[in-house]
Image: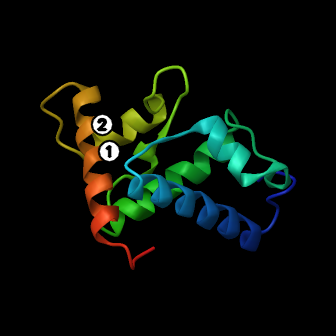
Amino acid sequence: MSNLISSSERWQAVKKQIRRLCIDAARDHATVTYSDLIRALGPDSGLMHRSPIFHRLLGQICHEENDAGRGLLCALVVAKSTGMPGKGFFGTLIQERACPDTPEACWERERDSLFDYWSSHVDEA
């Protein structure tokens, strides 16, 4: 864990904050870049968008949300340069979804499904 995410309570608090930011993006039918997400977390998080801890947090959120039947929420976190998630996400997507189309088309379906889900579940978070 990062120096600033040195306790289980802090880990859960940062994870909750990331989840909330992703849900807000979904309700706006938008994605959020890795760097904008880090910026929104603030400097006290001690995270950087390329840090393994940040990606471990995203992965944990992604799996927990999927297991709860709400989809791969981390699909909404994208690279500024491509507007798409990174390689780690696509590995998870292929593992979790039957994907007869291109990975990009499968991601677009997942993204749109998240938009629909969170737009219709406004009281849930």
Furthest-front residue in view? 28
User: CB under 8 Å between callouts 1 and 2?
Assistant: yes
Q: Which mark is residue 21?
A: none
Q: Residue at x 46, y 48 (%)?
A: 74
Say which of 71 and 56 sits in front. Answer: 71
Amino acid residing under circle 1: Arg
Q: Secondary structure at mark 1?
A: helix
Say which of 102 and 83 sits in front. Answer: 83
- In the rendered image, which residue does mark 2 sit on? 107
- In the rendered image, which residue does mark 1 sit on? 111
Q: CA distance from mark 1 to mark 2?
A: 6 Å
Residue 5, located in which quarter of the rendered image?
A: bottom right
**Quarter holding the C terminus?**
bottom left
Q: Residue at x 52, y 56 (%)?
A: 60
Q: Secondary structure at mark 2?
A: helix
Amino acid residing under circle 2: Trp
Q: Is residue 23 left or right of residue 96?
A: right
